[in-house]
């Protein structure tokens, strides 16, 4: 078996585990988001480092919810300075900056992606958001986070402060394959995290039809009629979602 086959096998195994053990949590996440949309609230997404890829996964894409606002800052991402972003995500001062720029309120939801769940910014942002009446969903690796200590001032980990936890079922350190020289490669958190998020979003659509509210989804801009359809949603939410227009 080649490493390609081994990674595929491990990824499928992790996906199956994540979906099989969390049917109730996935349904609860869909209920949270449905309630937010039904009441006119906003769904915020956040992640530092590679977690920001998942924050963007739910934003402005074909078949994606319109009312999703990613909480982003370049210094917490990778393309300005990857090494610096690792230090920045441990600096709790970011929380006030982000909340000033993204004014979350009661009735909104916040999905935080953090594989380790130990760093200050994701943990303290979750705590501050909950103080505002925001429901917080954590997407994390319980195997990883329960094997490490918190770096947050509160001394708590993301799984301990969120309203709901979705476990990506990844291994500590994320890299799923070990090699003879001691190296570990093949992260699974992005692929599994994206699958969990999109599964919840599909259920939100289903619930919107069952309950009779408009969840508002984008079309692909690359199909006929897509631009005109999406322009109305952009016009409706461009003042609430930085970077949409």
Image (cartoon, rainbow, N blue to C red):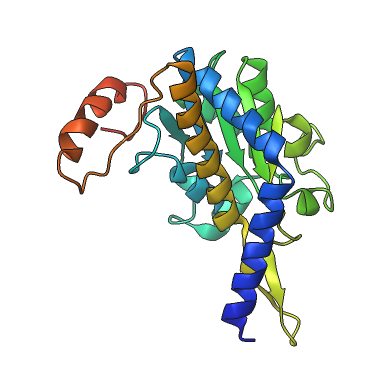
Picture residue at 52% right of the left edge, 19% below the top: 36
Kindly indicate the quadrant of the structure image that contains residue 239: top left
Expressed as whole percent of the image width and height from the top left, the position of residue 99 reads 53, 24
Q: Is residue 207 left or right of residue 216?
A: right
Task: Answer with left or right where residue 99 lies relative to residue 27.
Answer: left
**Image quadrant containing the N terminus:** bottom right
Rendered image quadrant of residue 61: top left
Judging depth in this view, the residue of 134 and 34 nearest the camera is 34
Instruction: Decide which of 173, 97 is in the foreground and name it.
Output: 173
Please, is residue 163 above or below residue 81 in the view?
above
On the rendered image, what quadrant is the C terminus found in? top left
Q: Is residue 215 visible?
A: yes
Q: Position of residue 70 (x, y in %)?
A: 45, 36
Q: Could you tell me residue 113's position as x and y percent? A: 60, 43
Between 123 and 15, which is closer to the camera in this rendering?
15
Above or below 164: residue 81 = below
Q: How many numbered discs, if any?
A: 0
**Residue visible at 67% across and 17% down in the picture:** 131
Q: Is residue 145 left or right of residue 47?
A: right
Given the current orientation, which residue lies at the most extreme front position? 210
Image x and y of residue 223, in percent: 19, 46
Q: Is residue 116 above or below residue 174?
A: above
Whether residue 104 can be seen here? no
Tell me which residue sits at (61%, 45%) in the image: 89
């Amino acid at each position: 078996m080649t490493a390609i086959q081994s990674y595929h096998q491990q990824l499928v195994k992790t996906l199956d585990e994540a979906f099989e053990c969390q049917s109730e949590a996935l349904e609860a996440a869909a209920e949270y988001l449905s309630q937010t949309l039904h009441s006119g609230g906003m769904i915020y997404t956040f992640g530092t480092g590679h977690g920001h890829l998942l924050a963007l996964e739910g934003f402005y894409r074909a078949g994606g919810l319109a009312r999703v606002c990613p909480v982003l800052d370049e210094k917490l991402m990778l393309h300005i300075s990857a090494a610096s972003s690792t230090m920045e995500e441990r600096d709790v001062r970011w929380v006030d900056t982000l909340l000033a720029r993204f004014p979350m309120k009661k009735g909104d939801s916040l999905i935080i992606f953090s594989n380790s769940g130990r760093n200050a910014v994701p943990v303290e942002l979750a705590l501050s958001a909950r103080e505002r009446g925001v429901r917080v969903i954590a997407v994390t690796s319980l195997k990883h986070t329960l094997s490490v200590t918190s770096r947050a001032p509160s001394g708590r980990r993301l799984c301990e402060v969120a309203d709901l936890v979705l476990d990506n079922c990844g291994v500590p350190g994320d890299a799923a394959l070990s090699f003879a020289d001691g190296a570990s490669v093949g992260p699974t958190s992005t692929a599994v995290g994206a699958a969990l998020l999109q599964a919840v979003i599909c259920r939100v659509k289903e619930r919107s039809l069952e309950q009779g509210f408009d969840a508002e989804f984008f079309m692909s801009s690359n199909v006929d009629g897509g631009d005109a359809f999406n322009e109305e949603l952009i016009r409706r939410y461009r003042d609430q979602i930085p970077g949409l227009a």
